[in-house]
């Protein structure tokens, strides 16, 4: 015990505060361009990068021109609201919903033109969402647990982002817990053409706060391109990058290129367009 106490005192007395003078780095445009085929207002958010150790919100960017190019020479113009959000109302030119078409994002910023391409892949129909009451135990709370049923398309490689909601709020608010799948499972070719496996189906319920009577359980299934899937997978890994074996953080690779089609280091972020399938159930009050 004496040796332990001596060690604690010794190490405690050796602690010094070291202030590092770090360069802020270049200012970069950040493009959050995840849109979908729904008939609701679509939003692309533009901000500017900030210092890694900054404790303030990243500055909104309202000085760019943002548009998406579609089939038949359609141009979907996204207009700024003055707070960094560039919005498109589908009531103008219709929803951005041509399955299989390679939509192109164009961003004009500081005299430069940047482009990214995303194919609108199909998404399976969610055909049901059963739920059951569970008494709780083994780390799970008492309540209602729902899951969704959908079948992956056979004969092709598909990627999905599963978004669960409880009463219109996201079930999970931790960026390290995005629910992603390759076909109907977590990876490989074993899930091609199958019903989504149980861990994915049941992931739409948070066992720490399951549903109660009167709650609405809803889920959205979004199709992804491979680059969007890889981007989000890196977001998950980066968000959980801490502890003893953490590695230095770095920017996640973007699919946004310069006008000549080359990689660039002025713009960060990603352009992704998804087809979307929805379903919801209300837990009845008994």
Image: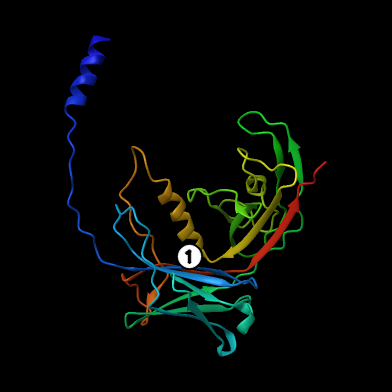
| Image height of 233 relative to 60, above or below | above
Residue 196: percent from left, percent from top = 67, 52
Label 1 crowding class (10 Å Cα cut-off): few <14, some 14-19, many 20+? Answer: some
Residue pushed farthest front? 82
In this picture, residue 224 sits left or right of residue 16:
right
Which residue: 48% across, 81% down? 67
In this picture, residue 23 sits left or right of residue 93:
left
Quarter of the picture containing the C terminus is top right
Residue 26: percent from left, percent from top = 25, 66
Residue 10: percent from left, percent from top = 18, 21
Q: Report the front residue among 37 and 24.
A: 24
Which residue: 38% across, 71% down? 61
Check the image and tell me how it is coloured. Answer: rainbow
Residue 41: percent from left, percent from top = 59, 72
| Image height of 16 relative to 219, above or below | above
Q: What residue is disc 1 on?
A: 227
| Image height of 256 relative to 108, above or below | above
Which residue: 76% across, 41% down? 132
Residue 171 visible within the image:
yes
Quarter of the picture containing the N terminus is top left
Residue pushed farthest bottom? 73
Q: Secondary structure at mark 1?
A: helix
Residue pushed farthest top? 2
Residue 154 visible within the image:
no
């Amino acid at each position: 015990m004496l040796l332990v106490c001596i060690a604690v005192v010794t190490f405690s007395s050796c602690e010094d505060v070291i202030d590092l003078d770090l360069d802020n780095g270049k200012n970069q445009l950040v493009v959050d361009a995840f849109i979908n085929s729904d008939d609701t207002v679509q939003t692309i958010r533009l901000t500017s990068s900030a210092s890694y150790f900054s404790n303030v919100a990243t500055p909104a960017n309202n000085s760019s021109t943002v548009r998406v190019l579609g089939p038949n020479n359609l141009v979907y113009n996204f207009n700024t609201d003055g707070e960094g959000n560039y919005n498109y109302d589908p009531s103008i030119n219709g929803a951005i919903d041509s399955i299989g078409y390679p939509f192109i994002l164009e961003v004009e910023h500081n005299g430069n033109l940047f482009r990214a391409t995303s194919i609108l892949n199909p998404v399976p129909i969610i055909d049901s969402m059963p739920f059951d009451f569970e008494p709780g135990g083994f780390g799970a709370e008492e309540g209602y647990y729902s899951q969704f049923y959908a079948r992956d398309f056979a004969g092709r490689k598909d990627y999905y982002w599963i978004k669960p909601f409880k009463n219109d709020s996201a079930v999970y608010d931790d960026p390290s817990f995005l629910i992603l799948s390759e076909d109907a499972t977590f990876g490989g070719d074993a899930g091609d053409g199958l019903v989504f496996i149980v861990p994915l189906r049941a992931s739409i319920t948070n066992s720490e706060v399951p549903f109660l009577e009167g709650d609405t359980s809803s889920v959205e299934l979004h199709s992804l391109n491979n680059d969007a899937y890889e981007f989000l997978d890196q977001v998950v890994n980066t968000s959980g990058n801490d502890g003893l074996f953490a590695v230095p953080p770095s920017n996640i690779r973007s699919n946004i290129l310069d006008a000549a089609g080359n990689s660039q280091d002025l713009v960060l972020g990603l352009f992704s367009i998804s087809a979307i399938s929805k379903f919801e159930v209300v837990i009845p009050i008994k």
